[in-house]
Image (spheres, grey):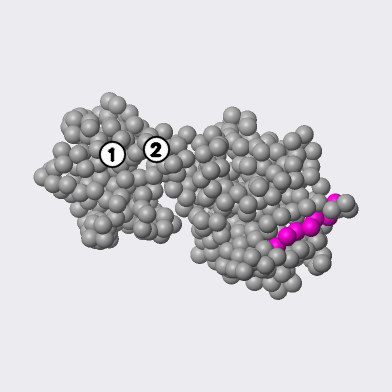
């Protein structure tokens, strides 16, 4: 049997960070990916967290680490692991430099809404960071990469090494390799509906994964079979509204004008009764809050008029989205709506009157509530949820009127296995399982309560890099 120092299960951002560190330490490494292509959900990552990177230092934008640590612990109601957060925050700036030294290019450092300026945005998103940086580097250093291959079994040998069963996706043929260490980097379980239903999510049927589609809990099941502790906190990284569509993959709708107009702009959102449930403006500046608020409803719709549609297309919308949207309007929005209508997408509803619209989407209180909403808009005062007057756009005019149905978009889960400060997987007694590590989404329960902290953006992707390097650094020290 082929013998390796490290077998890494999953070739996303975390897996490639681990592979890069393994290459730096001259460890014989096998990187296993079940998909046809590498990168996984990491291909869609915008950027990573850091508090004191060289980029921030040059911009005199270094952020107080103690305040960040306190922010994260408080935000999680102290469910997060303070020792892990402190180590992560201390090393994050060095990880940005490490990425640059491994071919990754950055665009700028940004905040998100009113959050801290910690988000180091990649040029070309995670796709370029992986495929133009980390992947060519690890290949040049001799890391073996196999695709269309699953790790279907792990057995610990008497000498504490692992027998790793590899199964080809196409012909189901198997082979076994030996590994001194195994690193689980399969991205969590957002695409496993059964696991979602058995965790503390409020409404998993309303969650729409916006990811690679491959995060089905593979690493968790492998670890559980070896006695690992299940450590669910119920954290799904929800980023707010996502258009509900069975025809178009969700990641193709994310970031489009039609999506941004109803999820980034604080328009009128109603639930299955046709009533508002939140101050939309408070949510769009923190999409974790947006996701939580929407996920408490059975159905969610954005309601708007033809006048709003025309104004957003030709004039302006109220909340600037620069630099992500270059001007304060959506030039393609009207055409996008017309195309969606022509193609018959189920998320779009259009009617000549509000009464007809209410009947179509089965929202019994919609007409009365819109009347109430328009009266509040005329007075410039939202007496229900105190949304600022500039965002109280009346849903009026002669029609037509529109309703776009939304689910709750999510990138990944942030729980599932318990790990220690070395990213070793812990058993049910809190003891490390020798030679077994979990990184990225497989081992991120240490970071969260039940909600991702958008107020410090980039932390999950940054943790993928940190945890990948952290696990391998500890392996190399053995």
Q: How crowded is the residue under tag 2: few (<14 C-alpha within 10 Å), some, or many (20+)?
A: many
The quadrant of the image that shows the N terminus is: bottom right
Q: Dot 2: what SS? A: helix
Q: Which image quadrant is residue 303 in?
A: top left
What is the x, y in percent for residue 464?
63, 52
Is 153 magenta? The answer is: no
Residue extent of the magenta highlight: 160-166
Would you identify the image quadrant in which residue 332 lies?
bottom left
Front-most of residues 176 and 125: 176
- Could you say where residue 336 lies in the image, as x and y percent from the top left? 27, 59
Residue assigned mark 1: 268
**Marks 2 and 1, Cα distance to the nearest angstrom?**
13 Å
Report helix, strand or loop for mark 1.
strand
Q: Residue furthest left?
A: 398
Residue at 80% across / 55% down in the picture?
162
Q: Which mark is residue 79?
A: none
Q: Report the residue at 55% width, 37% height from top.
A: 198
Compared across the picture, whether 396 is left or right of 453 comes to: left
**Residue at the image point whose x is 64% and y is 58% from the top:** 10
The residue located at (56%, 53%) in the rendering is 215
Q: Is residue 310 above or below residue 279?
A: below
The 10 Å Cα crowd at callout 1, few under 14, some 14 to 19, many 20 or more, is many
Determine whether 29 is above or below 220 in the image. below
User: Circle 2 is placed at which residue position?
Assistant: 294
């Amino acid at each position: 049997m082929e013998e390796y120092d490290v077998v890494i299960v999953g070739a996303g951002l975390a897996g490639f960070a681990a592979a890069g560190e393994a290459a730096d330490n001259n460890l014989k490494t096998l990187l296993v990916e079940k998909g046809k292509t590498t990168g996984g959900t990491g291909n869609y990552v915008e950027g990573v967290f850091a508090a004191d990177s060289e980029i921030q230092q040059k911009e005199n934008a270094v952020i107080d680490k103690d305040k960040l640590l306190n922010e994260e612990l408080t935000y999680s109601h102290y469910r997060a692991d303070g020792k892990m957060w402190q180590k992560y925050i201390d090393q994050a700036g060095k990880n940005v430099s490490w990425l640059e030294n491994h071919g990754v290019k950055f665009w700028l450092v940004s905040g998100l809404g009113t959050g801290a300026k910690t988000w180091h945005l990649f040029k070309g998103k995670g796709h370029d960071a992986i495929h133009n940086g980390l992947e060519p580097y690890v290949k040049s250093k001799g890391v073996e990469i196999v695709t269309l291959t699953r790790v279907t079994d792990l057995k610990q040998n008497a000498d504490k090494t692992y027998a790793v069963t590899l199964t080809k996706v196409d012909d189901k043929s198997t082979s076994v390799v030996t590994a001194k260490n195994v690193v689980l980097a399969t991205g969590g379980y957002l695409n496993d509906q059964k696991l979602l239903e058995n965790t503390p999510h409020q409404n998993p049927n309303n969650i729409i994964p916006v990811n690679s589609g491959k995060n089905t809990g593979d690493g968790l099941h492998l670890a559980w079979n070896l006695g690992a502790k299940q450590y669910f906190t119920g954290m799904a990284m929800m980023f707010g509204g996502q258009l509900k569509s069975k025809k178009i993959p969700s990641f193709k709708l994310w970031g489009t004008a039609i999506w941004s107009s109803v999820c980034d702009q604080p328009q009128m959102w109603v639930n299955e009764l046709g009533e508002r449930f939140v101050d939309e403006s408070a949510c769009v500046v923190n999409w974790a809050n947006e996701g939580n608020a929407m996920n408490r409803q059975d159905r969610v719709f954005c309601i708007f008029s033809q006048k709003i549609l025309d104004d957003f297309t030709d004039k302006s919308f109220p909340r600037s989205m620069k630099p992500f949207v270059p001007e304060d309007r959506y030039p393609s929005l009207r055409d996008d709506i017309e195309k969606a209508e022509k193609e018959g997408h189920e998320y779009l509803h259009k009617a000549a009157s509000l009464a007809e619209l209410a009947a179509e989407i089965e929202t019994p209180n919609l007409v009365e509530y819109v009347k109430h909403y328009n009266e509040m808009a005329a007075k410039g005062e939202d007496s229900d949820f105190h949304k600022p007057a500039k965002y109280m756009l009346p849903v009026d005019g002669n029609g037509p009127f529109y309703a776009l149905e939304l689910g709750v978009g999510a990138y990944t889960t942030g729980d599932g296995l318990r790990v220690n400060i070395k990213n070793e997987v812990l058993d049910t007694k809190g003891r490390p399982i020798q030679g077994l590590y979990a990184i990225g989404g497989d081992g991120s329960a240490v970071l969260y309560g039940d909600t991702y902290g958008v107020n410090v953006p980039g932390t999950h992707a940054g943790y993928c890099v940190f945890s990948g390097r952290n696990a391998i650094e500890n392996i190399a020290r053995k």
